[in-house]
């Protein structure tokens, strides 16, 4: 809240007028991400391109532990999540969860669940640590590993924050039994896989 009860944009922090959680200027910067196929056949719905306001929202959620930033992202993720019976967040490695105090995929899954009524199932556990997946393309990227701790009934929908190379989503999907798809908040501009 701003002064005298003004609501602030969750993206830029400036007072906003009207409905929604983002100001008009920030909403104009949101560019749809579309659907992609990853190698191995996983279909991914990306709410937005990882640019402008969408990038700021992910950053606020992921590195500033600001859960309200998940709300506008989840609203755009929800239509892609309706193809499954359960939402499975892709968990953040334990060391980064402790460092930043938040697990972005769990926050996004909870927000999508509130909008759709689809339940969330914590079916995966991550490793303790691996080199960060985020960063410039030439940077060495860690290899994520996940272990399934629960069986998933029916079709699953993986929920994650950013799709860069697709390695994290492929590792998570390989740890699960059955079939499903993935929904992410943003996709890097180059984007892996083929656009649908």
Image: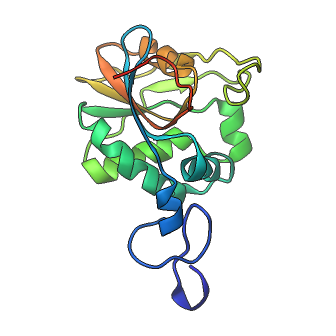
Q: Is residue 111 visible?
A: no
Tell me the quarter of the picture where residue 95 sits: top right
- Residue located 31% across and 37% down the image: 80
> In terms of depth relative to the viewer, which is nearer, 133 or 122?
133
Q: Is residue 57 left or right of residue 172?
A: right
Q: Is the residue 5 above or below the residue 67 in the image?
A: below
- Residue located 29% across and 16% down the image: 179
**Outermost residue, top direction?**
40
**Outermost residue, bottom direction?**
4
- Residue located 65% across and 39% down the image: 97
Q: Is residue 176 visible?
A: yes
Q: Quadrant of the C terminus?
A: top left
Residue 53, horizontal then vertical, whole percent: 56, 53
Q: Is the residue 190 above or below the residue 115 in the image?
A: above
> In terms of depth relative to the viewer, which is nearer, 84 or 136?
136
Residue 46, horizontal then vertical, whole percent: 42, 35
């Amino acid at each position: 809240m701003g002064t005298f009860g003004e609501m602030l944009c969750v993206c830029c922090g400036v007072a906003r007028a009207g409905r929604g959680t983002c100001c008009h200027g920030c909403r104009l910067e949101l560019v749809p991400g579309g659907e992609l196929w990853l190698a191995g056949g996983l279909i991914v719905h990306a709410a937005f391109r990882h640019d402008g306001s969408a990038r700021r929202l992910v950053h606020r959620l992921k590195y500033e532990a600001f859960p309200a930033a998940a709300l506008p992202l989840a609203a755009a993720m929800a239509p892609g999540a309706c193809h499954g019976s359960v939402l499975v967040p892709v968990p953040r490695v334990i060391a980064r969860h402790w460092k930043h105090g938040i697990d972005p995929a769990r926050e996004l899954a909870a927000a999508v669940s509130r909008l759709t009524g689809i339940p969330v199932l914590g079916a995966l556990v991550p490793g303790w640590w691996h080199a960060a997946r985020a960063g410039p393309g030439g940077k060495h990227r860690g290899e994520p590993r996940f272990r399934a701790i629960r069986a998933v009934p029916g079709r699953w929908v993986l929920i994650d924050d950013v799709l860069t190379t697709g390695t994290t989503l492929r590792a998570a999907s390989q740890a699960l039994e059955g079939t499903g798809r993935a929904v992410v908040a943003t996709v890097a501009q180059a984007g892996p896989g083929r656009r649908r």
